[in-house]
Amino acid sequence: NAYLEELRALGLDAGARARVAPLADTDWNAAWREHFRPLPVGNRLLAAPPWDVPATSERLVLVIEPGRAFGTGHHGTTAGCLTLLEAHVARDRPARALDLGTGSGILAVAAARLGVREIVACDSDPDAVAATEANAGRNGVAPLVRAVLADAATLVVAPAPLVLANLLAAAHRVLAGRY
């Protein structure tokens, strides 16, 4: 097969039993949407995609289109961060927050919807910054969320009483001194 030969020419050995077969053309964008439904999080929040926003809800609805960024509320770490954020804001009422590695901006948007009045949402991925800006606008909190393209390790901003960072442990180790 020509494709396997091209791989071998590049020095990539797919193995003797590798085969190339056609893959049915699927609308992958529509396929993943089937699994992204409104999700209650914590006591007051509901994470919902723009194509499935409930007409009414007793919860604060976070309308999140992740685009190519992480963060819909469905991953355990995101849901955990949202639950802790909700409790922290209710208890301490912080006026400012930093969201490091913001991804889709779900934590920044939630913070604003819960009452935090100024959030700096930082990510080193331009797609994530664009997703954060779009989601802040979608949720009516764009004036409260400033999305910046920057490395959290070198970000220069005023300290904030609340730091949000749904990151891998290795990133927390690198950033721990800055927290």
Image (cartoon, rainbow, N blue to C red):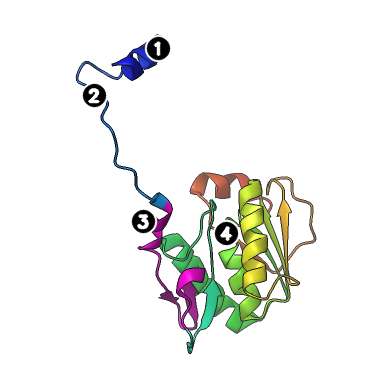
In this rendering, position of residue 81 left or right of residue 8? right
Q: Secondary structure at mark 1?
A: loop
Q: Is residue 113 above or below residue 65?
A: below
The residue to which callout 1 is attached is: 11
| Circle 1: residue type | Gly
Q: Earlier in the sequence, mark 2 or mark 4?
A: 2
Image depth: mark 2 or mark 4 in front? 2
Magenta region: 29-54
The residue to which callout 3 is attached is: 31
Q: Residue at x 66, y 54 (%)?
A: 129
Which image quarter holds the C terminus?
bottom right
Q: Earlier in the sequence, mark 4 or mark 1?
A: 1
| Circle 4: residue type | Ser
Assess disc 4: are there few (<14), some (14-19) or many (≥20) residues with their C-alpha within 10 Å of its C-alpha. many
Query: Cα distance, mark 1 to mark 3?
Result: 34 Å
* Disc assigned to residue 154: none
Q: Is there CB contact under 8 Å for labels 4 and 1? A: no
Q: Residue at x 53, y 52 (%)?
A: 167
Question: Does the magenta run of residues contain 51?
Answer: yes
Image depth: mark 2 or mark 1 in front? 2
The residue to which callout 4 is attached is: 104
Q: Which residue, as the protein is rendered here, is positioned at the far top?
A: 9
Query: Cα distance, mark 2 to mark 4?
Result: 37 Å
Image quadrant of residue 106? Answer: bottom right
Front residue of 47 and 154: 47
Q: Is there CB contact under 8 Å for labels 2 and 4? A: no
